[in-house]
Image (tube, rainbow, N blue to C red):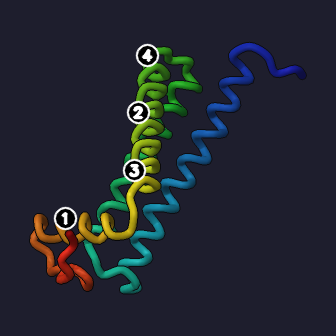
Amino acid sequence: MVCGGFACSKNALCALNVVYMLVSLLLIGVAAWGKGLGLVSSIHIIGGVIAVGVFLLLIAVAGLVGAVNHHQVLLFFYMIILGLVFIFQFVISCSCLAINRSKQIILRCTASGLLGYLLPLGCLVNFP
């Protein structure tokens, strides 16, 4: 049977969102596993990974419900959120490529000082 019209898009969106749900559950599981075994000691990293996993899970559920029920408003907001996530990832990727090693150290030392953490190794060096 030929897949045409909204049926093909619906099936593709359902498959994509199921993959997103599996990835989000994998993120949450790996974070919990890493914390349980003591591989990662920072609660901030664990919390961040779990938050990203939950956010991705919620977005995937919204996309799956919107695709299955042909709910246009939900699909519209799903599209907007995915567009914003893409722009955010693009900006972060460009900024990571544009910054050199000395600027990375300065940024890391400044951020750790602002957040009240112990200064990482290499932050005692003065950069011009």
The mark closer to the camera, 2 or 4, is 2
**Mark 1: few/some/many CA within 10 Å (<14, 14-19, 20+):** few
Nearer to the camera, 110 or 19: 110
Q: CA distance from mark 4 to mark 1?
A: 39 Å
Q: In which image quadrant can residue 114 be found?
A: bottom left
Q: Position of residue 82 (x, y in %)?
A: 47, 34
Foreground mark, 3 or 4, reads 3
Residue 124 seen from this side: yes
Vertical order, 57 against 36 (above or below): above
Q: Say what secondary structure mark 1 lies in.
A: helix
Viewer-proximal residue among 115 and 73: 115
Identify residue type, mark 4: Val
| Distance from the alpha carbon under mark 3 to that under mark 4 | 33 Å
Query: What distance separates the C-alpha of mark 2 from that of mark 3?
Result: 16 Å
Q: Disc 3 or 4, which lies upstream in sequence?
A: 4
What residue is shown with label 4?
73
Q: Residues within 10 Å of mark 4 (few under 14, many from 20)?
A: few
Distance between mark 3 and mark 1 Cα atoms? 16 Å
Q: Residue furthest front?
A: 128
Tell me how far mark 1 sits from mark 2, CA to CA: 25 Å
Q: Earlier in the sequence, mark 3 or mark 1?
A: 3
Identify the residue at image location x=46%, y=42%: 90
The residue carrying mark 2 is 84
Cβ atoms at labels 1 and 2 below 8 Å apart: no
Q: Quadrant of the C terminus?
A: bottom left
Residue at mark 1: 111
